[in-house]
Image (tube, helix red, strand yellow):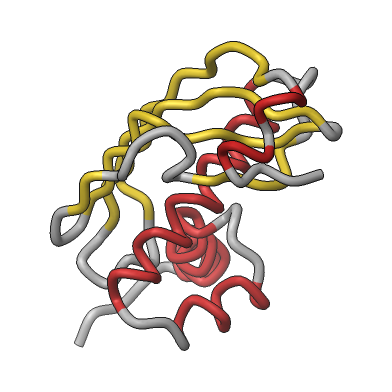
Amino acid sequence: MLLVAPMKKLCLMVLAPLALAWPAKAMDNALRAGLLKLDPQTRLEQRCDAEVLDRISHDDRKFKADRVVAYAFATPQMSADAIKSPGAAFRSKGQWFRLKFKCQTAPDHMRVLQLLYKIGDEIPETDWAKYNLYD
């Protein structure tokens, strides 16, 4: 039988739930529930889309990213647990911007293990319809 000192036991009780929640810190309960209803490939796409939106808004406060289209300029490349989207776009404050990203998830597609992205130029409003981008 393992005996744990009272202070260590308290730390374990407080920190263990935080450690379990940490990878999904950006994912709220509604998103989690919705993702669990999707087929695995769609879940991978949606989880990565949500993560890139969250990271863009967090990393650069001038953006408030609220929508991403992974296939705007090129078809994303999919593997079992990753997506590479060289021709994506995202919307922030009513404007669209070019985006490239690579995202790898855990096998259940609920936790993002790695995300790399690069924001490109603003997309002129005259091009939005051509690329199925909407206001």
Which of the image's four quarters has the C terminus? Answer: top right
Residue 76 percent across, percent down from the top left: 30, 44
Could you tell me which residue is drawn at 55 percent across and 34 percent down? Answer: 89
Above or below for 21 versus 70: below
Q: Please name whichever residue, 86 or 25, is drawn nearer the observer in this view of the structure.
A: 86
Residue 91 percent across, percent down from the top left: 70, 36
- Left or right? Give the position of 119 relative to 67: left
Could you tell me which residue is drawn at 67 percent across and 47 percent down? Answer: 67
Name the residue at the top extreme: 121
Could you tell me which residue is drawn at 53 percent across and 14 percent down? Answer: 120
- Left or right? Give the position of 66 relative to 27: right
- Left or right? Give the position of 1 relative to 21: left
Which of the image's four quarters has the N terminus? Answer: bottom left
Q: Please name whichever residue, 54 or 89, is drawn nearer the observer in this view of the structure.
A: 89
Q: Please name whichever residue, 79 or 8, is drawn nearer the observer in this view of the structure.
A: 79
Above or below for 78 versus 73: below
Residue 122 percent across, percent down from the top left: 67, 16
Could you tell me which residue is drawn at 41 percent across and 27 percent down? Answer: 100
Above or below for 130 versus 25: above
Above or below for 51 versus 100: below
Q: Please name whichever residue, 4 or 29, is drawn nearer the observer in this view of the structure.
A: 29
- Left or right? Give the position of 66 relative to 94: left
Residue 94 percent across, percent down from the top left: 84, 34
